[in-house]
């Protein structure tokens, strides 16, 4: 693949580091190597740049810079929020979350359940949406935290987190959201929100891997997860990862500039890609068509395996992800699609396309040129497809109702 053109549509997995971000980071690998915690001016100039990056992140989120804590990744931020909520309220041992969360939240909550905490896992409907009445009923007096993602990483379905935060605030319960997929794609104004804590990750918005933040609303009780030195005002120990912090700040500034493009041009590319793929027989789009991230499309090609589709796509330089766990050695399809009730024959053949500002019309053309042949070739070998052809029981090119 190194010698062929790559069509990269796997941006919900990770993104290209923007050239402007690389340029902003480079001096901090070389001449500006001081420790921002040092008392001397050489370190002080670095501390000033860390403060600037913190402000850039806060500006994108509509937050105050003192509410931003730098971490190593979104997973650390999620874990910190959950464990802090429990540690700061030891008399409360109940958590509410959903069945479609990222493993950073889902596996953490399942682990806590095995330790004696009680966890309510809310269901979603066929389009991936939550029932807010069921959520409100699930919150109890002993609920320490409600943790629900802003947007799903597989389907792009957006949850009404501002409304959820208000429900939680009215009941006196902390609310945390994993916003890793939402930041940079949706307008966010935390200053006008009741959200208690928010996690984000740099590598999903053209910053490098290995840097994230946890937003902690003023007045939210907090107990550090990583303990040690005084960094981040005592909220996250460890010498600051200066180059990556600088990079995240630059990426957040760029994301603010490109927010309109994400919701117009990129969305237009996604929609054209989707409509072209739906022309393939027995194909469906997963998730609420009206409440999704502008860059994300989860498409199921029935009666074929997602892993096989990806391998054929890769041979043609097309990068995407499977909604199936086949690549990890499991025969079970994605937990998200299972929770949504997507049919077995469709869940196994799901592909997630996730675009960015670097994608072009030519990229979409390339995918649409090759995908019908890939699916046709694989279906010839599928006994399920042969059975379908005999029964002719599925409507070609439909969107999930």
Image (spheres, grey):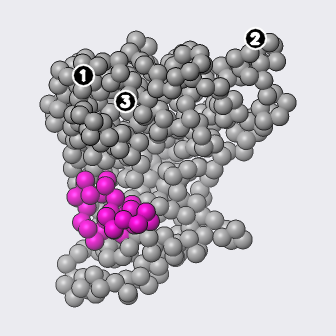
Q: Residue at x 47, y 32 (%)?
A: 77
Q: Earlier in the sequence, mark 3 or mark 1?
A: 3
Q: Earlier in the sequence, mark 1 or mark 2?
A: 2
| Distance (Cα) linking label 2 and label 3 | 34 Å
Q: Relative to 50, say whether 204 is above or below.
A: below
| Distance (Cα) linking label 1 and label 2 | 42 Å
User: Residue 34, percent across and down?
Assistant: 78, 23
Q: Nearer the viewer, residue 271 or 85?
A: 85
Task: Please give the residue where the numbered disc 3 appears in the rendered image.
Answer: 82
As for residue 298 lying within the magenta part, the answer is no
Task: Please give the residue where the numbered disc 2 appears in the rendered image.
Answer: 39
Q: Earlier in the sequence, mark 2 or mark 3?
A: 2
Task: Please give the residue where the numbered disc 1 appears in the rendered image.
Answer: 92
As for residue 333 lying within the magenta part, the answer is yes
- The residue furthest right is 31
Would you call the spot at circle 1 few (<14 residues within 10 Å), some (14-19), or many (20 or more)?
Answer: some
For the residues labelled 3 and 1, say whether their Cβ atoms are less than 8 Å apart: no
For the residues labelled 2 and 3, say whether their Cβ atoms are less than 8 Å apart: no
For residue 94, say whether it is visible.
Answer: yes
Q: Relative to 49, say whether 282 is above or below.
A: below
User: Residue 298, percent across and down?
Assistant: 39, 59
Q: Secondary structure at mark 1?
A: loop
Q: Which residues are magenta?
A: 322-350
């Amino acid at each position: 693949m190194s010698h062929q053109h790559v069509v990269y549509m796997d941006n919900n997995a990770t993104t290209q580091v923007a050239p402007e971000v690389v340029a902003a980071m480079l001096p901090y690998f070389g001449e500006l190597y001081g420790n921002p915690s040092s008392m001397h001016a050489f370190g002080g100039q670095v501390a000033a740049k860390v403060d600037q990056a913190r402000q850039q992140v806060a500006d994108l989120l509509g937050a105050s810079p003192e509410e931003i804590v730098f971490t190593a990744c979104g997973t650390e931020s999620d874990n910190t929020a959950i464990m802090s909520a429990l540690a700061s309220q030891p008399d409360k041992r109940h958590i509410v979350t959903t069945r479609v969360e990222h493993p950073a939240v889902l596996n953490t909550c399942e682990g806590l359940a095995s330790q004696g905490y009680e966890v309510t896992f809310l269901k979603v409907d066929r389009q991936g949406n939550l029932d807010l009445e069921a959520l409100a009923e699930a919150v109890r007096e002993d609920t320490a935290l409600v943790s629900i993602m802003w947007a799903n990483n597989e389907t792009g379905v957006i949850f009404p987190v501002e409304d959820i935060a208000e429900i939680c605030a009215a009941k006196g319960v902390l609310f945390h959201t994993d916003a890793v997929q939402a930041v940079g794609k949706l307008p966010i104004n935390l200053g006008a929100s009741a959200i208690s804590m928010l996690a984000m990750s740099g590598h999903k918005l053209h910053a490098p891997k290995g840097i994230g933040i946890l937003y902690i609303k003023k007045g939210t009780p907090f107990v550090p997860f990583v303990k040690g030195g005084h960094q981040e005002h005592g909220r996250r120990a460890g010498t600051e990862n200066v180059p990556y912090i600088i990079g995240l700040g630059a990426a957040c500034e760029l994301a603010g500039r490109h927010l309109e493009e994400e919701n117009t041009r990129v969305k237009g590319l996604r929609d054209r890609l989707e409509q072209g793929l739906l022309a393939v027989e027995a194909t469906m789009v997963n998730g609420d068509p009206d409440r999704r991230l502008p860059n994300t499309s989860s498409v199921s090609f029935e009666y074929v395996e997602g892993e096989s589709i990806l391998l054929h796509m890769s041979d043609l330089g097309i990068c995407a992800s499977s909604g199936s766990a086949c690549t990890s050695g499991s025969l079970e399809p994605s937990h998200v699609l299972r929770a949504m009730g997507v049919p077995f024959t469709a869940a196994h053949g799901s592909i997630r396309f996730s675009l960015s500002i670097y994608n072009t019309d030519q990229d979409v053309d390339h995918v649409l040129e090759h995908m019908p042949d890939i699916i046709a070739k694989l279906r010839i070998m599928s006994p399920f497809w042969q059975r379908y052809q005999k029964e002719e029981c599925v409507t070609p090119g439909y969107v999930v109702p």
